[in-house]
Amino acid sequence: MAIQNELTATLPITDPMLPRLTRVLVRRREGPETLTLELEAGAAAPAFLPGQFNMLYAFGIGEVAISMSGDPAVADRLVHTIRAVGETSTALTRLEAGDHVGVRGPFGAGWPMEAAYGCDVIVVAGGLGLAPLRPALYRILAERERYGKVVLLYGTRSPTDILYRHELERWRRRLDVQIEVTVDYANGPWHGHVGSVTTLIRRTDFDPLHGIAMVCGPETMMRVTALALKEAGLKEDAIYLSMERNMKCAIGFCGHCQFGPHFICKDGPVLRYDRLGDLLRLKEI
Amino acid sequence: MADTGQVLVEHKFFSDLEEAFRPLVGGCAKMIIFEAGQYLFHDGDPAEWFYLVRYGRVALEVVAPGRATLTFQTIGESDVLGMFWLMPQSHWTHDARALELTHAIAINANCLRQKCERDHDLGYDLMKRFVPILLRRLESAQLQMLDVYGHSK
């Protein structure tokens, strides 16, 4: 039929709803209940932008949105850091090297890498929220001369929960980036900061008129972080948050991730605070 | 030896302190140094001093029976250490231990409270300085207590 032919002609070559079959190459434990999977990208895998996510399919169990957390310049593998919280994410954390997994993506709007050119960049991460920010940090460090002062403020639960510890230690030795880590509590040989991540913002010098903030973490943490950044002089349109909602189709069809007027899967997950601020205070959504 | 009043206004907390108040506050202050590992005070000690940290870092710790010492906050350069002094006859409810060589300005609480009673303008000035810090610490403590990193991103 002519109508069917027309529809077929407009379909993309790869169906965004169809998972690609891929394999686990590396499985690396990051901390309690958290691990990183490195997946074979394959020739069909499109390049991704820092801040985007994939839908990972644990066969026979379900599909879940997981942020890209690897270096966007490395094309041969997809890196995902996963915490076991539900049935699907728990199944993914039980995969071993060589096991198969389905992948759809990448999806969504990423961090404002080009908009941040020439600006001081304040990256604020909370807990597992460091994972979606790591690709942005890789990109910034690869193009370091394009950015002003670069600061990573990372808050997490305790010293044993610190993600990517070796990488943070390596970055900390660089002279062109400031890395500050704080934990909610510490016991044992910890000589770093203890306290909320907002205390680090108030101790950090940056140019608020030419600054941009990228924030990811639990929503409560992001709300108070955004307020602390505003107090420090940043404008609302210079603060970007990565939102998390229950994503299903990942292409803006099903509405599961609707957040006010936004579909987090398609319009986000990275959204500007001036478009989110009022919605974050609503309990109903 | 540096003049205490001058060092006082070099600290961020008192950098804009009115000229008239400087000798009043400075008269209650002394310079103090803590070696790494040295305790500034212990749980249960009378809260007779508070500190403006100039350099170094201090851990605020609690000890619970059968558990390792728990650090719940660190205080660093330009920070204020100790709020209990605001209430007369209060006691510390935690330990404070220097994590590294720490230079501080110690201010005698009783001395400063008496001056605030005599000069309410000074008291009001100090209230405006301390209340924002108290509120921020309360906000920070709330976040820590909520354990927001515990079970979700």
Image: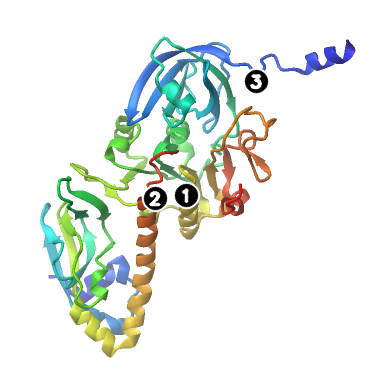
Q: Secondary structure at mark 1?
A: helix
Q: Nearer the viewer, residue A220 or B2?
A: A220
Q: Which residue position holds label 1?
A: A220
Numbered label attached to residue B146: 2
Badge 1 sits on which subunit? A
**Distance in Å between CA atoms under marks 3 and 2:** 38 Å
Give neighbour class at mark 3: few <14, some 14-19, many 20+ (Cα, 10 Å): some
Badge 2 sits on which subunit? B
Look at the numbered discs 3 and 2 and tell me whether their residues touch, using CB distance below 8 Å.
Answer: no
- Image location (x, y in percent) of residue A233: 49, 58
Q: Is residue A135 left or right of residue A181?
A: right
Task: Say if labels 3 and 2 share a chain.
Answer: no
**Distance in Å between CA atoms under marks 1 and 2:** 9 Å
Identify the coloring. Answer: rainbow
For badge 1, the amino acid type reads Thr
Q: Which residue position holds label 3?
A: A16
For badge 3, the amino acid type reads Pro
- Residue A31's place in the image compared with B4, above or below, is above
Numbered label attached to residue A117: none
- Image location (x, y in percent) of residue B3: 17, 74
Look at the numbered discs 1 and 2 and tell me whether their residues touch, using CB distance below 8 Å.
Answer: yes
Whether residue A71 is visible: no
